[in-house]
Image: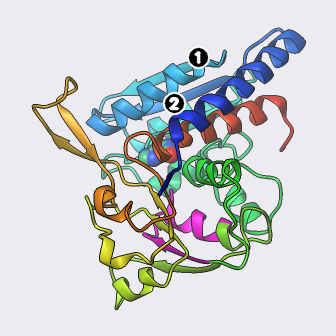
Amino acid sequence: MNLLDGKLVSAKIKEDIKRDAAAFTAQTGRKPHLVAILVGNDGGSETYVASKMRNCELVGFESTNIRYDVDITQEQLIKKIEEINHDPTIDGLIVQLPLPKHIDPDSITEAIDYRKDVDGFHPVNLGRMQRNLPCFIPATPYGILLMLDHYRIETAGKKAVVVGRSNIVGSPMSILLARNSNPGNCTVTITHSRTEHIKEEILAADIVVAAIGRKNFITAEMVKEGAVVIDVGINRENSTETKSGFKLYGDVDFEEVSKKASWITPVPGGVGLMTIVGLLKNTLEAARGTIY
Ligand code: GUN
């Protein structure tokens, strides 16, 4: 088993981003600027947004976290988004998901100017991604591509099985792996909660992307010998063992699956760190105006 080491790869790419951000600032007299909107107080979302903001500072970006109480209305939120859309000092805008039930996430996603949509969730970016045109690619799939690229993992012609069909990971990942690009050119199967014989589907995969959000869902008996296993799961459980008070588990039973996999990502220390890198790269591109 070889480790797909998110710590190592993310640190290396962040050095490149830091250098490019410094060059941007020297040229323009301002830093790339990301705004993150956080509604309510979901524990996971708070941790993710704090990490995004911290990493912006680390690479020399400006970052602003706007927080709203859980009872903000959809209209109020969209008004703020439109304000940011028109603010030339802001390059990228993300609204952390999930949102409270009374707010429709699709309406929020479509309210964001696609040229500032560094999450890559807007239909314009989604459509352009499917066509292999310049666009913002959702951060987690983008980070996974960067990881596969770093380790020169051969994907062309391989059978990839994506477990989970979310808008954030599973669905864009399946598009990206099937595209005529490198990494890409896979034969892709998307599996989900309604898939029949899911174990057999996953067993046939050369590349497994697990993004289903269930602790240790992928067991050794579901994975082919020599498969590449990408674990997107960040399942939080309360724990007295750690300082933070919780422990993270992937969607993959790492202990057992690592005995069969040729390459595997750990949790933590794998895809999560690469997601940040994807977001930072998108924000830099937004500031430079190289995509739009
Ligand atoms: N919630 C979980 N992942 C993400 C992400 O990549 N972006 C946003 N906005 N919300 C998320």
**The residue at label 2 has a CB less than 8 Å from ligand 1:** yes
* x and y, in percent, of residue 130 in the image: 72, 68
Disc sitting over residue 58 in the figure: 1
- Real-space CA distance between mark 1 and mark 2, rounded to the nearest whole angstrom: 16 Å
**149 up-or-down from 158: above or below:** above
Residue 253 is marked as none
Q: Confirm whether residue 97 shows in the render.
A: yes
- Asked if residue 122 is positioned above or below residue 194 in the image, the reply reads above
| Residue drawn where x is 59% and y is 22% of the image | 56
Crowding at dot 2, Cα within 10 Å, few <14 / some 14-19 / many 20+, comes out as some
List the residue tagged with mark 2.
36
What residue type is disc 1 on?
Leu
Q: How is the image coloured?
A: rainbow
Q: Position of residue 162 (x, y in %)?
A: 50, 71
Is 114 placed left or right of 273 in the picture?
right
Find numbered disc 1 in the image and state the secondary structure of the residue it sits on: helix
**Quadrant of the drawing holding the C terminus:** top right
Segment colored magenta: 159-176
> Where residue 267 sits: x, y (%)?
37, 46
The question of residue 219 being in magenta is answered with no
Q: Most extreme residue toward the left, as rendered? A: 240
- Counting labels gives 2
Q: Nearer the viewer, residue 260 or 13?
A: 260
Residue for point 83% across, 8% down: 29
Image-quadrant location for residue 59: top right
